[in-house]
Image (tube, rainbow, N blue to C red):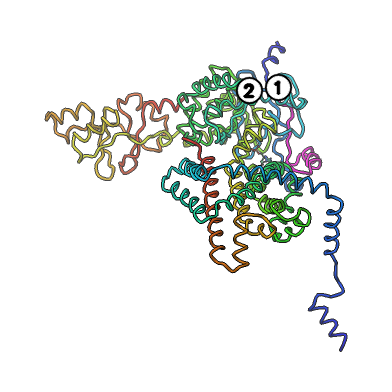
């Protein structure tokens, strides 16, 4: 009888004696990095910190009225709709009016830094995997993992390796936001009409000439869609990043949660939404201009 | 004597074979044993795109490759400019083995010696007409002012003057292919490779383009290798025509030689299909009448229509587009002056034709006609008109 129940256990429950410990090796690896790669992480931290302070200074340097005017002009230039331009300017003004202008600037600093890093690495990687099968085979699974791995998971090692603050926030945001620009750059380049690329070749274009004079310009609308998605994803990380010490609007949301102050939370939430809408529409406008050149 | 003749050969293709697939060795053995394309594909998965093709192209002549879709025409020209490396066989340009070119020699060959025109144009939508035409020169590193000047010249040569700064998307198919041709000519190549350049165009536009190509060829004396699946086009353009089937060339001859002496039934059928082709029917060249009035409209309306359309006669139809006749400007004015009744002002006994009539049968009528000829169907409904000019143009 006993034999049957063992068999039953074995059939219906995962056998307890099969256990592979991967937690400790991962901890070990992080420990190892912490101990031996310190100079490396120091360099990263230093570079990112100076980048953040540079961009931060730049953002702060733009007076509120100038930023609002710029948004007005850019919106009008792209959409030719005066009402829309007024709406976005008023929305931006509203962020200042509810006392969140400085926090918005801090958030923008982290978002812009992450987007710049994402583009600096993402565009070349996208171009690379569009033409190399082997690079594609290596990068694709990494991208899949990055996109499906819950971001909380890599917040832990980011904090351990880089400390609290905006630096690990930029890294975490970049990891989260870089996949779309890579994917869409590569996709855009691959979907360029083969006959057009062939025409370039037949006129004696080198690989580089075909890439920069034909493939990338033809892929531009798709690439810009990737850039737009990257920006949106970077903004969506704002609250998560505040948990590892990123300053800005996300912090307000956290405070709202901790103190059970709905108003504080919502105010910051609305500000994030406004920033997201404006950034989205402005980049969408660029995409439209790319895909429909002047008559 | 022999030497002089050889000097005139700009391109020689010798035993060119191109296989697509992985088991090429096995496929080649089967080819040697005389198995056909289908068997080889079934056994090895290898496509025999081009099978032991040889031909010579004379300088300044139009060499046409014709065959059904999939017969290997594109692959032959793509081997000529090395977009596809041959599996075996040789291609000599001016006596030089094209396959032996180094990387930079190959680029040079493509930049200066051979240019290609594509079936679906292969134009770059992010560049305007001018920058598309200047593309080849830009690739070569020609100065901006110089290449734009040259591009302008080519653009006006293909009849697109005034469209230099237009977007490709704003052009019709025929105009796009003119850009394609201008782009190819801008490089001043020795050989123009044209892979079904007119197949995507309407019959009327196609005739225009064929005429254009012939006049350009006359002016510039380029060597042209032209691909088509239309025997009429082949005979109209080609000094020499090579007919391909399943990757092999079955006959190379002048159009006359091929018509009078077809190598086999396949070629004979191909040539016979010419007479049945749509292109020979009135339908392919008829146009919609620009100025149409009804019997119940008055003379004033007719005059206004003629004025708007800038013509001196109007086609008159009764109910349900029943063709009645033609109202001339002169008669319409008489009606307005009260010298003639509207109903009596139409010229009624005019020659008409049907959409299915062969153009050849229309020539005597067209030669006599003083107005465009009305095309009517079996119910006497007006379906279009044919102008004298379009009848004559179709004969070129
Ligand atoms: N890149 C390729 N890979 C595999 N098969 C090809 C390729 N290009 C052409 N083929 C095959 O070679 C044959 C000849 O094609 P092609 O030269 O394009 O014919 P055509 O231009 O006369 O229509 C066809 O059966 C086609 O499927
Ligand atoms: Mg083809």
Q: Position of residue B369 (x, y in %)?
A: 31, 26
Q: Position of residue B89 (x, y in %)?
A: 76, 30
- Looking at this view, is B283 or B265 the one in front? B283
Dots 1 and 2 on the same chain: yes
Circle nearer the N terminus (1, 2): 1
Please tell me whether mark 1 sits on a helix, a strand or a loop. Answer: strand
Q: Residues within 10 Å of mark 1 (few under 14, many from 20)?
A: many
Instruction: Please say if B59 is above or below A270.
Output: above
Q: Are marks 1 and 2 in contact (CB under 8 Å)?
A: yes
- Residue B93 is tagged as 1
Q: Residue at x 62, y 62 (%)?
A: A254
Q: Which residues are magenta?
A: B12-35
Q: Is residue B25 magenta?
A: yes
Give the residue at mark 2: B191
Residue appearing at x 74%, y 21% in the figure: B96
Residue at the far left: name it: B338
């Amino acid at each position: 009888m006993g034999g049957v129940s063992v068999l039953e256990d074995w059939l219906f429950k995962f056998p307890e004696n099969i256990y592979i410990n991967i937690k400790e090796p991962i901890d070990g690896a992080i420990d190892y990095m912490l101990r031996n790669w310190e100079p490396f992480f120091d360099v990263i931290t230093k570079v990112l910190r100076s980048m953040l302070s540079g961009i931060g200074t730049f953002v702060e340097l733009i007076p509120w009225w100038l930023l609002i005017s710029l948004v007005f002009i850019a919106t009008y230039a792209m959409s030719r709709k005066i009402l829309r331009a007024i709406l976005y300017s008023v929305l931006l003004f509203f962020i200042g009016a509810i006392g969140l202008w400085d926090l918005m600037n801090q958030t923008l600093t982290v978002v812009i830094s992450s987007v710049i890093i994402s583009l600096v690495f993402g565009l070349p990687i996208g171009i690379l995997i569009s033409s190399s099968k082997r690079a594609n085979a290596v990068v694709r699974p990494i991208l899949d993992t990055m996109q499906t791995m819950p971001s909380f998971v890599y917040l832990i090692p980011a904090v351990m390796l880089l400390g609290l603050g905006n630096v690990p926030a930029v890294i975490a945001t970049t990891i989260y936001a870089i996949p779309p620009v890579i994917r869409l750059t590569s996709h855009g380049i691959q979907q360029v009409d083969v006959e057009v690329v062939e025409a370039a070749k037949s006129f004696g274009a080198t690989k580089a000439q075909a890439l920069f004079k034909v493939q990338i310009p033809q892929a531009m609308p798709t690439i810009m869609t990737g850039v737009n998605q990257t920006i949106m994803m970077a903004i969506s990380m704002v609250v998560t990043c505040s948990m590892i010490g990123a300053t800005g609007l996300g912090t307000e949301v956290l405070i709202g949660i901790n103190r059970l102050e709905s108003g504080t939370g919502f105010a910051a939430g609305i500000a994030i939404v406004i920033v997201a809408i404006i950034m989205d529409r402005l980049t969408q406008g660029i995409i439209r201009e790319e895909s429909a050149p002047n008559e | 004597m022999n030497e002089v003749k050889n000097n005139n050969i700009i391109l020689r293709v010798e035993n060119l074979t191109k296989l697509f697939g992985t088991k090429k060795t096995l496929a080649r053995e089967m080819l040697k044993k005389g198995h056909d394309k289908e068997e080889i594909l079934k056994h090895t998965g290898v496509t025999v795109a081009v099978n032991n093709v040889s031909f010579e192209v004379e300088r300044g002549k139009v060499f046409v490759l014709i065959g059904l879709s999939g017969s290997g025409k594109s692959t032959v020209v793509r081997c000529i400019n090395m977009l596809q490396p041959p599996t075996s066989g040789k291609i000599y340009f001016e006596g030089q083995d094209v396959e032996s070119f180094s990387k930079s020699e190959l680029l040079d060959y493509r930049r200066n010696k051979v240019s290609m025109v594509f079936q679906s144009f292969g134009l770059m939508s992010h560049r305007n007409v001018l920058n598309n035409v200047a593309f080849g020169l830009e690739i070569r590193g020609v100065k901006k002012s110089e290449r734009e000047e040259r591009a302008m010249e080519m653009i006006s040569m293909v009849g697109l003057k005034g469209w230099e700064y237009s977007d490709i998307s704003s052009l019709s198919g025929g105009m796009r292919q003119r850009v394609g041709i201008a782009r190819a000519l801008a490089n001043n190549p020795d050989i123009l490779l044209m892979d079904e350049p007119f197949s995507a165009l309407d019959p009327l536009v196609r005739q225009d383009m064929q005429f254009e190509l012939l006049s350009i060829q006359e002016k510039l004396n380029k060597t042209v290798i032209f691909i088509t699946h239309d025997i009429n086009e082949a005979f109209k353009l080609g000094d020499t025509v090579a007919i391909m089937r399943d990757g092999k060339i079955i006959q190379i001859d002048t159009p006359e030689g091929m018509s009078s002496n077809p190598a086999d039934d396949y070629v004979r059928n191909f040539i016979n299909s010419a007479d049945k082709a749509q292109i020979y029917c009135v339908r392919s060249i008829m146009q919609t009448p620009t100025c149409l009035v009804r019997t119940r409209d008055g003379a004033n309306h007719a005059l206004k229509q003629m004025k708007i359309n800038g013509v001196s006669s109007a086609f008159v139809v009764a109910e349900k587009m029943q063709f009645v006749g033609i109202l001339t400007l002169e008669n319409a004015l008489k009606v307005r002056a009260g010298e003639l009744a509207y109903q009596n002002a139409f010229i009624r006994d005019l020659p008409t034709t049907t959409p299915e009539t062969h153009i050849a049968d229309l020539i005597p009528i067209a030669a006599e006609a003083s107005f465009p000829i009305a095309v009517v169907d079996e119910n006497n409904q007006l379906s279009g008109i044919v102008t004298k000019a379009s009848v004559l143009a179709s004969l070129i």
